[in-house]
Image (cartoon, rainbow, N blue to C red):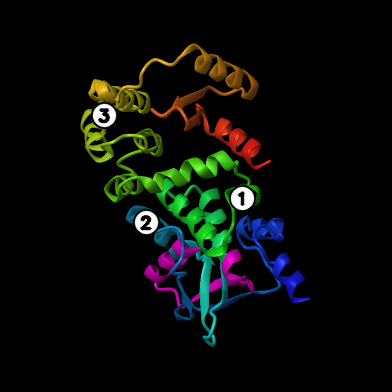
């Protein structure tokens, strides 16, 4: 019985119900909603959103002072605490309500698991375009690391392609300084993605901001950097010309697989490596699918 319950409560369980909570219209009357003292509600420490615009909060505070909180905040009972609730979705409304000096706020209480709480928080922020790309990637990484979900399963549940999830997660490989620029909005996610393959992303990020480069110009800059580095390699490190048999084998394999294939032999001729080349993440997905069956 417990196994069935755990399966039912996994990522994507009742996703339509979770989405209904996220899409809850203003002034909705639901069976479990009520008003609670604002001091009984606490923020979720694992909330994927980390940056709250001061001007947006001020605007929302003014609206709440004039009209009250139009959309209930989704909360869950705080584990190991009596009469305390954790915010699942709606922290910005809670912050603005505090600034408006409200004593009570409307809430909808849901008995969410840790996984569901994080999932709803991510969905709510993504739907409202409130997360920057770094926060979004960090939220996905939390779901994968803490709860063991794969990129495929995560994409399925949240309505994203696997390549989209993989692409945005790659932003977390950038140096922290560059991630901070994206989080602050100084650098766009498109610029950041172009910098992933750069050997000097921090230096190029400064140049992008200084010169006001477009994403396409950034891509050309990174490509130029890569080609320049390759040209500077000592000639002794360059591979010798391949024999006709190796080139023919590369051609046959490339035609069979549908991807460019490179074969390199060691100096002994007894070992070597085969390299598959891809131009898009969708092609990488195809390669992974073939290799894993």
Q: Which residue corresponds to the image point at 37% horizontal and 56% vertical from the top-left?
A: 51
Q: Position of residue 66 (x, y in %)?
A: 45, 62
Q: Position of residue 260 (x, y in %)?
A: 53, 22
Query: Which quarter of the rendering shows the N terminus?
Result: bottom right
Nearer-N-terminus badge (2/1)? 2
In the image, 200 versus 122, the foreground residue is 200
User: Magenta residues?
Assistant: 90-116
Q: Is residue 84 above or below residue 133?
A: below
Residue 105 included in the magenta stretch of the image: yes
Residue that badge 1 annotates: 158
Residue that badge 3 annotates: 212
Residues at marks 2 and 3, CA–CA distance in whole angstroms: 24 Å
In the image, 100 versus 287, the foreground residue is 287
In the image, 257 versus 66, the foreground residue is 257
Residue that badge 2 annotates: 51
**Callout 2: 10 Å neighbours few (<14), some, many (20+)?**
few
Nearer-N-terminus badge (2/3)? 2
Residue 222 included in the magenta stretch of the image: no
Q: Which residue corresponds to the image point at 49% horizontal and 30% vertical from the top-left?
A: 275
Tell whether label 3 touches label 1 (CB within 8 Å): no
Tell whether label 3 touches label 2 (CB within 8 Å): no
């Amino acid at each position: 019985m417990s196994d069935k319950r755990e399966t039912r409560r996994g990522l994507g369980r009742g996703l339509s119900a979770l989405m209904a909570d996220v899409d809850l219209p203003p002034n909705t009357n639901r069976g479990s909603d009520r008003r609670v003292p604002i001091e009984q509600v606490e923020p979720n420490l694992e909330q994927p959103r980390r940056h709250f615009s001061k001007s947006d909060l001020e605007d929302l505070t003014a609206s709440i002072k004039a009209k009250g909180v139009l959309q209930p905040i989704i909360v869950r009972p705080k584990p190991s605490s009596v009469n305390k609730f954790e915010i699942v979705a709606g922290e910005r409304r809670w912050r603005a309500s505090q600034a408006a000096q409200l004593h009570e706020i409307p809430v909808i209480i849901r008995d969410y698991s840790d996984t569901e709480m994080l999932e709803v928080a991510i969905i709510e922020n993504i739907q409202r375009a409130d997360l920057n790309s770094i926060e979004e990637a960090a939220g996905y990484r939390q779901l994968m690391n803490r709860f063991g979900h794969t990129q495929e399963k995560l994409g399925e549940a949240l309505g994203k392609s696997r390549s989209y999830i993989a692409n945005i997660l790659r932003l977390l490989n950038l140096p922290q300084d560059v991630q901070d620029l994206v989080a602050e909005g100084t650098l766009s996610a498109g610029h950041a993605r172009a910098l992933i393959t750069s050997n000097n992303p921090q230096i190029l990020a400064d140049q992008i901001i200084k010169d006001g480069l477009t994403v396409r110009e950034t891509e050309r800059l990174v490509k130029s950097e890569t080609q320049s580095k390759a040209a500077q390699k000592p000639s002794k490190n360059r591979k010798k010309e391949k024999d006709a048999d190796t080139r023919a084998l590369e051609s046959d394999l490339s035609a069979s697989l549908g991807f460019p294939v490179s074969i390199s032999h060691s100096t002994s001729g007894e070992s070597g490596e085969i390299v598959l080349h891809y131009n898009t993440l969708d092609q990488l997905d195809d390669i992974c699918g073939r290799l894993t069956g």
